[in-house]
Amino acid sequence: MDLPVPEHMRPLRERMLAFLTERVYPVEKTLERGKLDPEGGGTLRRLQDEAKEAGLWALGHPTSMGGGGLPYLDYLYVNEVVGMSEYAIYVFGTHTLHDCLMLDRYASEEWRDKYLRPMADGDIPGPSFGMTERDVASSDPTQLRTAAVLDGDEWVINGHKWFTTHAHSARYTVVMARTEPDAPPHKAFSMIIVPTDTPGYDIVRTIPVMGETDGDHCEVRYDDVRVPAGNLLGARGAAFAIAQQRLLPGRIFHVMRFLGQAQRAFDLLCERAVSRVAFGSALADKQLIQKMVFDSAAEIQSTRLLVLEAARRLDAGEEPRVEVGIAKVMGAAMLHNVIDRAIQVYGSIGLTADLPLERMYRQARFARLYDGPDETHVQNVARMLLRPYRPATP
């Protein structure tokens, strides 16, 4: 598909795409085994070093962190490429971006020195964010039960978190806990930095997800975890405001990568359609297959336009919650649909690990849940769209 990539971004995008196809694609199976196989970890480190040498490292991070400093609108064109491989976010150092932005804005100098630059440089693993809980509907985070009480100059944290990503490898987790029990719900929670080697921080297990037993999502218990009062991220009671500022760009980063993943599935679909013969002609000559190609192209391009508008507004200093919410929901559906059609065109081999589609398909199902389920985004966006039409309150 002919992408409307600005001239000033074409060389950088092309270099990144060449690096991805020539160096990352051939070793994806090795990278998949990286958690269990030392060779996989060594391959990742080698690729990270090569990406840095090629000037392709952390392109969306501010220059103050050693990154490329790309604005959101330009970052879209390289983050699409990153999305083409599940492992590219680690190879190119983009996976820490929204957490680095959060630390840069709210962390004390101590934690900025200890975690921010080393994480942006890829010298320490991360990030880890502890918000979701198993025993409540975390789509309504005012129900979260994990609590922190200030005892002298220490926070004492107790609770049970669920789907804390990278807890088993990260140096710290930013945990969202109730610290102001008498405050209104949206001012009752704070964010606290908890080093993962703190006594009482107990990783119960790595949660098996859709057949993946070596995933990155952990169940964590906090049993009288004590950390200094200075580990507070931002102000007391400011967790919701901080989370919104973290998640708004984070969601659009996800959808940028959805576009790349969908583009890879679309390429595979079209390659199969023109090369596979059935009933006397190529699959590409069948009208039902042509409809799959049309629908996929239309959904990818429509999502790209949504993301471009959201990125433009973010660069302008706005908070485009409507645009980001719509892009997140539509992008997740688009990703699932395009991969599903590609599997259908491949038939039985599309269900196997011989192709990347089956793993991509599982990952696509996660997209409708993380960073807020579709239903929450639909409800929130609809409320914002309806607000101007409601009668004015006297």
Image (cartoon, rainbow, N blue to C red):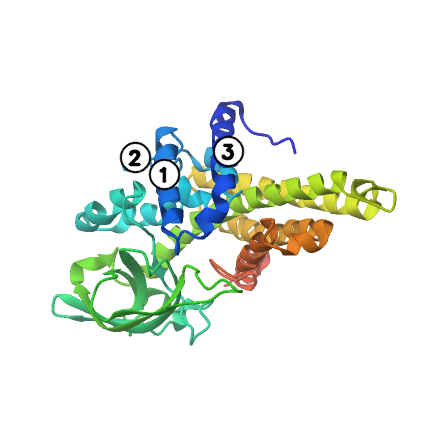
Which residue is at the front of the view, 7 or 312? 7
Cβ atoms at labels 3 and 2 below 8 Å apart: no
| 309 relative to 87 in the view: left or right | right
Which residue is at a point 31% across and 33% down the rendered structure image?
A: 63
Residue 351, how many percent across, how many down?
Answer: 64, 56
Q: Nearer the viewer, mark 3 or mark 2?
A: 3
Identify the residue shown where x is 39% and y is 34%: 51
Q: Which quadrant of the figure has residue 177?
A: bottom left
Residue 66's label in the rendered image is 2
**Pointer 3 local density, CA inside 10 Å: few below 14, some 14–19, many at least 20:** few
Q: Which residue is mark 3?
A: 22
Total of numbered circles in the picture?
3
For the residues bearing labels 3 and 1, Cβ distance under 8 angstroms: no
Residue lying at the far bottom in this picture: please name it.
Answer: 135
- Amino acid marked by disc 3: Glu
Mark 2 element type: loop
Q: Residue at x 62, y 45 (%)?
A: 265
What percent of the width, then of the height, locates residue 31?
A: 44, 48
**SS type, badge 3:** helix
CA–CA distance between discs 1 and 2?
Answer: 19 Å
Is 39 positioned to the left or the right of 192 in the image? right
Residue 46, numbered circle: 1
Q: Nearer the viewer, mark 1 or mark 2?
A: 1
Where does residue 65 sit, x and y in percent of width and height? 29, 38
Q: Secondary structure at mark 1?
A: helix
Q: Earlier in the sequence, mark 3 or mark 1?
A: 3
Which is nearer the eye, 18 or 102?
A: 18
Quarter of the view holding residue 297: top right
- Neighbour class for label 2 at 10 Å: few (<14), some, many (≥20)? some
- Three-letter residue code for mark 1: Arg
- Which residue appears at 31% of the width and 43% of the height? 122
Coordinates of residue 288 in the picture (x, y in percent): 81, 48
